[in-house]
Amino acid sequence: MDAMKDIIIGIDLGTTNSCAAIVEGDNIGIPQVKLIPYKGGEYTIPSVFAIDDKGNELIGYEAKRQWQLNPKNTIYGAKRLVGRSYRSDIVETWQKAVAYAVRPGKKNDVVIDIAKREFSMQEVSAKILNKIRDVASNHLKTPVKRAVVTVPAYFTDRQRQTVKDAGKLVDLEVVRIINEPTAASLAYGVGKRLNERVAVYDLGGGTFDVSIIEIRDRVFEVKATGGDIFLGGLDFDNAILGHVLKDFASKTAIDLSTDPVAMQRIKDLAERTKCDLSAREEVPFNIPFITMTSQGQPLNIEMKFSRKLLEQLTSHLVDRSLQIVAKVLVDSGLSTKDIDEVLLVGGQTRMPVVQDRLTKFFGKSPSKGVHPDEAVAIGAALYAHSLEDDTNLKLQLLDVIPMAIGLEKAGGSFHVVFPRNAAIPNAKQLTATTSYDQQTELAMRIFQGDNEAVTRNELLGEFTFSGIRSDRAGKVQVEVTFDVNVEGILTMHARDPASGKEMQTTVRVTSS
Ligand code: AMP
C-alpha cells in the first residue's frame, strides 16, 4: 500500500479547543500515541474562526487573539450549531449569547454571517478541520488525508453527517466518526487487559456526555449513554457574566449587554476567573474602562469572586449533569457500586466541586487515569491505528445510539424504530401498506429524540419511495429497512417485494 495513504490521525473536534494525535509505532503490542504539537508547543488549537478587517481568514490562536476587538466577525462555539435546524430552541438560546449573526439557511439549517460573508456550519467545521490537518501535515512532514474524528455521544445522525460532510469539503476523508466518551475509554483502557466497567463523565467547553462502558481487554462495549448538547464550560462562564452584568447595572444603572466589545471582555475574564478559582479560593475581577458615563467619565469593573460564589451561581449546571448520570445508570441496568472507575474528561471537570459531587455520587474518587484535555484525541488515534491493523489485535467498539430514531405517524405521534441505547450497527425492517387507491409514493419523516410528540424531536430528514405499483388501497406492500451504521448514521432502503424494485438513500434534511 502507498505509505502516504497509511497515515491516519485522530482528531478531537472540540467546542472550544481541538486536538490531534497519531500512533507512532508499537511497543510489544502496545501502540505508542503522540499528540501533534502546534507551533509554540501547545497541543490544542482553539476552535475559533474569524475574518479580520482586511478580509483575512484566521483560525485557531490567531482568531482567538483578536476576538475581544472583533467579536462580530469571530465564530466560536460553532459545534453547538452543527447539524441543527434553525428552528430548534437551542439555536434561539445560542443566538442571544453570541455577537455573530446567526440566520436560517435554505434548508432550515443554520448560517452565520461574518464580514459580509456567509458560512454554513459545515464550512466552519471544515475550516477548523483543515487547520488541524495542516498542522498535522507540517509536523508529520507528509500530507494527511484521512482521520478518525470524534463527536459528542449525544450528537444526532444529522450532526454526525454534517461533520463527515465538513471533511469532504476540505478533502479530508473522515474514515470513522466515534463518540468522545468512547474514545476516552480507549485512551484509558487500551493495552491494560482490563475487565471493568467505567463511567466516563465528559464535561467540555460546550457539551456534556456520560457513557457507561464495559471494557473486556480489547472490547469496549457501551452499555448506555446520555448527555446534553447545551451544557458545558461556556454555561459556567455565562453564569459569571450574568452576575457581573447584574452587579454592574445595580451600581451604575448601565446595561453592558448591548455593548459587544464590553461583553467579550467580561466573557474572557469570566473564563479566566473560573479556571483560576479551580486552584484558588478568591480572585479579583477587575476590568478598567469598560464603558463611560453619559458625562464621558470612564467606568471600571471592580469586584471579587470567591469559589463559593461561583459554586452557587453554577450549582444548577452540576445538578443537571448528575441527573443525566443517574438516568444513564438506570438505562444501563447498573448501580453506582457496579462502576469500577469514574473517568473525568473535558476541561470543566477540573472544577473542584464537580469532582466532589461525583465522588459523593459514586462513593469513590474519580480516576486520574486519563488526561482530561488529551484523552479523546488519543483514543481517536488508537482507534485509527486499529482500523489499519490486520492482525487479531484489533479494537472492537460496540456503541449505541443516544436518542431514539423513528418516524412520524398519522396524528403526529412518534413511532420508535430504534429505542435510545440500541446497539449499533443495527437494522430494522417495517412493512408499510398503501393507504389509498393508486398510491404511487410513500413519504416518511424521520426524527431523532426521546419525546413522544414527534415534532419536539430533531427532524433527520424526509424519505420518499416513489414508483410504487399502482393498485387498490392496502394491496401493495413496501418493505422499508432502517440501517444505522457503526457511526450512528442512518441509511434507508425500500423495496416492493412483489416487483423487486428498490431504492436507497441516506436520509437528508429537506426544508420544512
Ligand atoms: P474542553 O472542551 O475539554 O477543551 O474544555 C474546555 C472547557 O474547560 C472550557 O470551558 C474551559 O474554561 C474549561 N476549563 C479549562 N481549565 C479549567 C479549570 N482549571 N477549571 C475550570 N474549568 C476549566
Image (cartoon, rainbow, N blue to C red):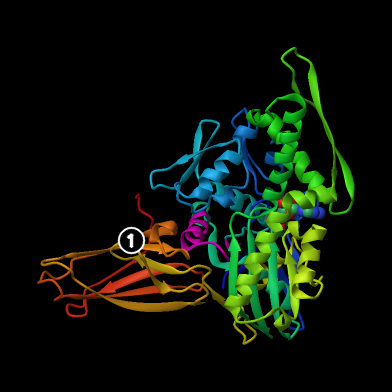
Q: Work out whether residue 161 or residue 439 is closer to the camera in this orientation and state it.
A: 439
- Residue 57 can be seen in this image: no
Q: Which quarter of the picture shows residue 224?
A: bottom right
Q: Which quarter of the picture shows residue 11?
A: bottom right
Q: Residue at x 69, y 34 (%)?
A: 263
Mark 1 surroundings within 10 Å by alpha-carbon count, few (fewer than 14), some (14 through 19), many (20 or more)? few
Q: Quadrant of ligand 1?
A: bottom right
Q: Secondary structure at mark 1?
A: loop
The answer to whether 251 is drawn above or below residue 178 in the figure is above
List the residue tagged with mark 1. Answer: 412
Where is residue 326? Give x, y as percent: 65, 71
Indicate left or right for 191 with 435 as reference.
right
Query: Is residue 165 located in the magenta-colored stretch of the structure?
Result: yes
Q: Residue at x 71, y 25 (%)?
A: 253
Which residue of the protein is positioned furthest toward the front in this rendering? 250
Where is residue 16? Give x, y as percent: 67, 50
Where is residue 452? Give x, y as percent: 42, 65
Query: Does label 1 point to a residue whose CB lies under 8 Å from ligand 1?
Result: no
Where is residue 167? Give x, y as percent: 53, 56
Q: Which residues are magenta?
A: 146-166
Q: Residue at x 52, y 46 (%)?
A: 91
